[in-house]
Amino acid sequence: QVQLVESGGGLVQPGGSLRLSCAASGSIFSIYAMGWHRQAPGKQRELVAAITTGGITNYADSVKGRFTISRDNAKNTVYLQMNSLKPEDTAVYYCNAALRVEAGTFDFWGQGTQVTVSS
């Protein structure tokens, strides 16, 4: 069974840091773009950051200069380093990846991990 499993969420004070990880597992032929989205209560899910297989990155304006996305292709894992966290970063963070599996290429999502920024 193909799945994305996130880890690293939690409670942090404003100005603090967290590192999220998301590992893809199962019968995967190829992994293409990977990314992180977030959804705060009462708001739509939004793209936070994305990274291509070649390492080209894209960030939401609200996180530029504070968040860094990276990936380890050997480990099928994408990371999100979050620094200088603000209360408005509080949300459930979801990773997603375009995966080529036996049936074709599809967009897969993780189950989400809660990030709470509060004093």
Image (cartoon, grey):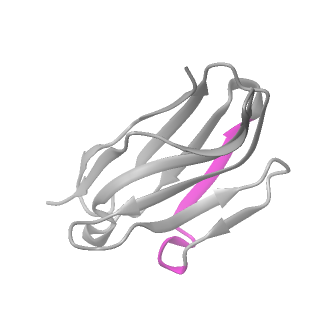
Q: In the image as oriented, which residue stretches furthest toward the bottom?
A: 61
| Number of numbered tags placed on the structure image | 0
The picture places residue 103, in percent across and down from the top left corner, at: 72, 32
Q: Quadrant of residue 85?
A: bottom left
- Which residue does the image show at 25% across and 68% down from the upper left? 87
User: Relative to 24, is 85 on the left or the right?
Assistant: left
In the image, what residue occupies the spot 50% across and 71% down? 63
User: Can you say whether 11 is above or below 67 in the image?
Assistant: above
Determine if the magenta segment contains residue 102.
no
* Residue 46 percent across, percent down from the top left: 45, 69
- Bounds of the magenta span? 61-72
Q: Against 5, is 9 above or below? A: below
- What percent of the width, then of the height, locates residue 71? 69, 41
Q: Say whether residue 71 is magenta.
A: yes
- Rendered position, 42 above or below 82: below
**Quarter of the image containing the N terminus?**
top right
Tell me: 54 left or right of 5.
right
Residue found at the far right of this picture: 54
- Left/right placement of residue 38 relative to residue 72 reads left
Name, please, the residue furthest toward the front: 103
The image position of residue 88, as x and y in percent, is 29, 72
Give the residue displayed 39% in from the left and 52% down from the top: 93
Image-quadrant location for residue 65: bottom right
Q: Residue at x 21, y 66 (%)?
A: 41
Front in this rendered view, residue 109 or 88: 109
